[in-house]
Image (spheres, rainbow, N blue to C red):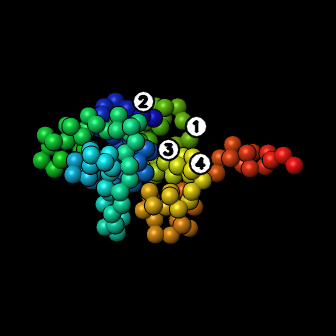
Amino acid sequence: MINCAKNTEQESLIALGGLAGCRISESLACTTDWIDLQDMTLTIRGKGDKTRTVPIGPYAWRYMQESYVMAFSKPDKRLISYRDRFARQIVCNLGVRAGLSRRVASHDLRATFATAVYDDTLNLRLVQELLGHASSNTTEIYTGVSMTNMREAVSFNV
């Protein structure tokens, strides 16, 4: 999807959701002040005015850095200037443009992030922290189990 983006704001929108686990509202609220270049972290002010800090990986930064630089010329210093409904539509459109088999909603980016982190680490507590969930029950909903993981789980040798 990120490769189908038409501009840097669209790239940042996908990177923040799919590579940093941000909700759409968090992505749209993200300002230059949220990013610590020294530590390469993103401090997210999310739901319920809770704050969490997540690392910004090199792949995510690649797609966010131009929006970050351009944001300094904006009075509010936001990386993405879209309104909520328009941003959600962009995500859906990028899913279609990418040829995905089903309609993609903005929250699917966050779920994809959670699943990818869980598949790599098998650490539900880590995913819970990255998503900013108070309960691990909420986190479990986001961590889809892939067929590959299920096959690996049952392919033990006796």
State the CA–CA distance, disc 2 to disc 3.
15 Å
Q: Secondary structure at mark 2?
A: helix
Q: Residue at x 37, y 45 (%)?
A: 56
Badge 2: residue crowd in 10 Å (few <14, some 14–19, many ≥20): few
Whether residue 83 is visible here, answered yes or no, is no
The circle on residue 119 is: 4
The amino acid pointed to by label 1 is: Ser
Identify the residue at image location x=52%, y=43%: 103
Q: Position of residue 3 (x, y in %)?
A: 42, 29
Q: In the structure shown, which secondary structural element does the residue marked by tag 4 occupy?
A: helix
Q: Which residue is mark 1?
A: 101
Identify which amino acid the numbered label 3 is placed on.
Val
Rendering coords of residue 95 (x, y %): 47, 37
Query: Within 10 Å of the Cα at label 3, are there few (<14), some (14-19), or many (20+) other Cα atoms?
Result: some
Residue 117 vertical position relative to residue 70 in the rendered view, above or below:
below
| CB contact under 8 Å: marks 4 and 1 | no
Most foreground residue, 30 or 86: 30
Of the numbered discs 4 and 1, the one sitting upstream in the chain is: 1
Of callouts 1 and 2, the N-terminal one: 2
Residue 104: assigned label: 3
- What amino acid type should be assigned to the residue bearing mark 4? Asp
CA separation, marks 4 and 2?
23 Å
Q: Percent position (x, y) of residue 158?
A: 87, 49
Circle 1 residues within 10 Å: few <14, some 14–19, many ≥20: few
Dot 3: element: loop
User: Which comes before the other along the chain, label 4 or label 2?
Assistant: 2
Query: Residue drawn 50% across and 70% down?
Result: 135
